[in-house]
Amino acid sequence: MGKGLLECKHFAAEWLRAFEIKRAGGNIQRLDEIADFNDDEVLRRGLWMMSIVGGPIVYLVLPFTLSILQTFIWVQLTAILWTLLKIAMGLIFAIFAMAVYFTFLQDRGSAG
């Protein structure tokens, strides 16, 4: 990987680690688990969490909600909202693809 990509990966892992620490609150056992994770594990877990939570919301809930709301809102606004939803779908798919990639990359690294 290039130096810039490694820096982005490290930044994302640190951001996800800080989020996990904040979510753990005062749970000492959970904080110890988070401290034991390396950057790849934190990144992989965060990507899977985003794709598992974001997938059903972006692919099921939001299109259903928008299809109901489009009867009540302005047509041009509906087109903009559908475009934003399609962008969100693309982002969630990219997050899912990265989660799969990092999972198989880790499995290949531990097998060799």
Image: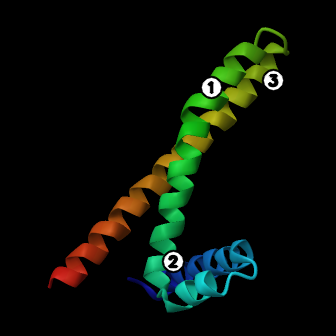
Location of residue 62 in the rendering, given as x and y in whole percent from the top left corner: 66, 30
Do the residues bearing badges 2 and 3 touch, measured as CB atoms within 8 Å? Answer: no
**3D distance between C-alphas at marks 3 and 1:** 14 Å
Residue 1's quadrant in the figure? bottom left
Residue under label 3, please give it.
77
**3D distance between C-alphas at marks 2 and 1:** 30 Å
Q: Is residue 91 visible?
A: no
Nearest the eye: 108 or 3: 108
Identify which residue is drawn at 58% across, 47% down.
54
Q: Is residue 54 visible?
A: yes
The secondary structure type at the circle numbered 2 is helix
Residue 70's quadrant in the figure? top right
Above or below residue 89? Residue 82 is above
Above or below residue 15? Residue 76 is above
Identify which residue is drawn at 56% across, 79% down.
13
Above or below residue 71? Residue 43 is below
Q: Is residue 107 left or right of residue 93?
A: left
Nearest the eye: 75 or 92: 92
Give the amino acid type for the residue marked by disc 3 in the picture.
Answer: Leu
Location of residue 93 in the rendering, given as x and y in whole percent from the top left corner: 47, 47
Location of residue 101 in the rendering, given as x and y in whole percent from the top left corner: 34, 64
Q: Is residue 98 left or right of residue 8?
A: left
Residue under label 2, please give it.
42
Location of residue 80 in the rendering, given as x and y in whole percent from the top left corner: 74, 29
Identify which residue is drawn at 85% across, 15% down.
74
Residue under label 1, please give it.
63
Residue 34's quadrant in the figure? bottom right
> Which sits earlier in the primary sequence, circle 2 or circle 1?
2
Q: Is residue 101 left or right of residue 26?
A: left
Give the amino acid type for the residue marked by disc 1 in the picture.
Answer: Pro
